[in-house]
Image (tube, rainbow, N blue to C red):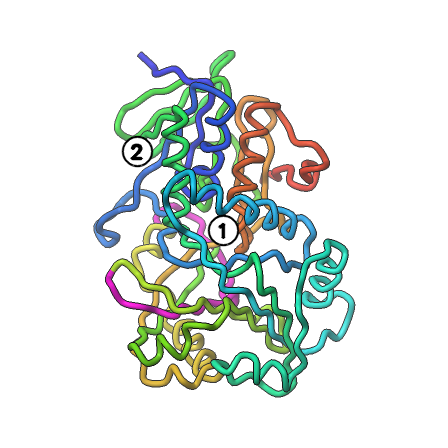
Amino acid sequence: MAEQFRYIVIGGGMMGAAAARHLSEQADGVALIGPAEPPDYQAHQGVFASHYDEARITRQFDADPLWASFAARSIERYRDIETRSGIRFYTEAGCLFAGPEPRSASDYLHRAAQVAQVSGLLVEKFEAPQLVSRFPQFSFPPHLFGYYEHVEAGHINPRALVRAQKAIAAEQGGRRINAVVTAVREEGGHVRVETANGLVCQAERVLIAAGAFSNFHNLLPRPLDLRAAPRTVVFFELDEERQARFGSMPSTIVFTEREEDHVYILPPVRYPDGNVYLKLGGDIEAGGFATLDEVRTWFRSSGDPDEARRLVEVALQLMPGLSGCRTTSAPCVATFTPTGRPYAGFQPSSQVAVLTGGNFVAAKSSDELGRLGALLMLNGGLGEEDFGSGMLPLFR
């Protein structure tokens, strides 16, 4: 006998957990199905998620008004989510963008400054000499300038945010099911969902928010036009002296002469092993994963050693005070859409919708994306005030 629900959200990550919270505020019969974080990555044969970490940058400064709007809407709700769940996940440390003066109107920093001006976002601009004196943790090249968003920006703990979303959803009557979904099929007026442990569920509508795993496990009749790409991050283990030196730095994104070579830097954060790390990552790796085994193998690795070495070199150039720190690396996976925007919409039917495509910037905006996923389930679509036509999913 199949368990009956009105709405099922598949995927217990940042978007899925947020969608379950927003749905359970407005409807009964909500289930969130997805696996828990594996205790042993090396032995794990199931699916993974990229939110298994302690720090992601949050900010509103963005070259795309859609992403800027989604971030603003999410950040506005952070403190309420913390209060309602009793789980703290947000640190208002500010966010700094540093880079060369834009050479054209199409450059990221030029467009982001325009979006900020139109939206009334408070951002302070620093010329090169001011940048060096204001942020002494860094050794920026003399030709860089910066935009500093000092309030309602900083970093979030993605693990803690997901826990908070799930806790509120459970308090509101949402059902949490720790399982991997292996099939989704439409049968007449309902959707049948099967899991790897033999559970069968039925719902009026289903939202698939499975991130990099959206195109696997028979979740969709046609694969999304979506690229799941490898990313590598490095961690600098900080002693007490360096914790003090770097403790007041903001979340930071640094552009070089080529925008695609930018790096992002998280301030010192304490991790579950008890150590404090400064994290740095980039966006240079290309390619993608064609099979489920490729994604699993990548998640069980330490990332790309060549990219890790490059990131360490860049970090030491920008922050010479990190010299001598012990470094480690880890894998991450980012999902990219051809539009550069998330997918939030239905496949050809009106019973199964998708919510994915973070494009490497969605963690900070996950609560708003979850709200939009909930609206898809409740209303069957999104209006233009929510950028609905700009997020229609594309299929291969």
- The N terminus lies in which quarter of the figure? top left
- Label 2 sits on residue: 178
In the rendered image, which residue does mark 1 sit on?
Answer: 363
Mark 2 or mark 1, which is nearer the start of the sequence? 2
Number of marks? 2
Of residues 19 and 309, the one drawn nearer to the viewer in this rendering: 19
Q: Residue at x 65, y 48 (%)?
A: 69
Q: Residue 89, image x and y in percent? A: 41, 51
Q: Position of 14 compared to 103: left or right?
A: left
The residue at 26%/46% (across/down) is 38
Q: Position of residue 293 (x, y in %)?
A: 34, 48
User: Left or right of 273: which side holds 286?
Assistant: right
- Is 11 within the magenta? no
Q: Point out the image quarter for the C terminus.
A: top right
> How far across and down, in percent of the image, does residue 84 sit?
42, 38
The residue at the far front in this view is: 83
User: Quick check: is 292 in the magenta stretch?
Assistant: yes
The answer to whether residue 284 is above or below residue 317 is above
Asked if residue 311 is positioned above or below residue 339 in the image, the reply reads: below
Tell me the SS state at disc 2: loop
Q: Using the rendered view, name the quadrant where residue 183 is placed.
A: top left
Give the residue type at disc 1.
Ala
Badge 1 vs badge 2, beta-carbon distance below 8 Å: no
Q: Which of labels 1 and 2 is toward the front?
A: 1
Q: Is residue 41 above or below residue 81?
A: below
Residue at 69%, 62% (x, y): give it: 112
Segment colored magenta: 273-293
Q: Residue at x 50, y 12 (%)?
A: 188
Give the residue type at disc 2.
Answer: Asn
Q: Choose between 136 and 52: the one closer to the eye.
A: 136
Give the percent coordinates (x, y) of residue 357: 54, 46
Kindly report the distance in space between the C-alpha atoms of the residues bearing marks 1 and 2.
22 Å
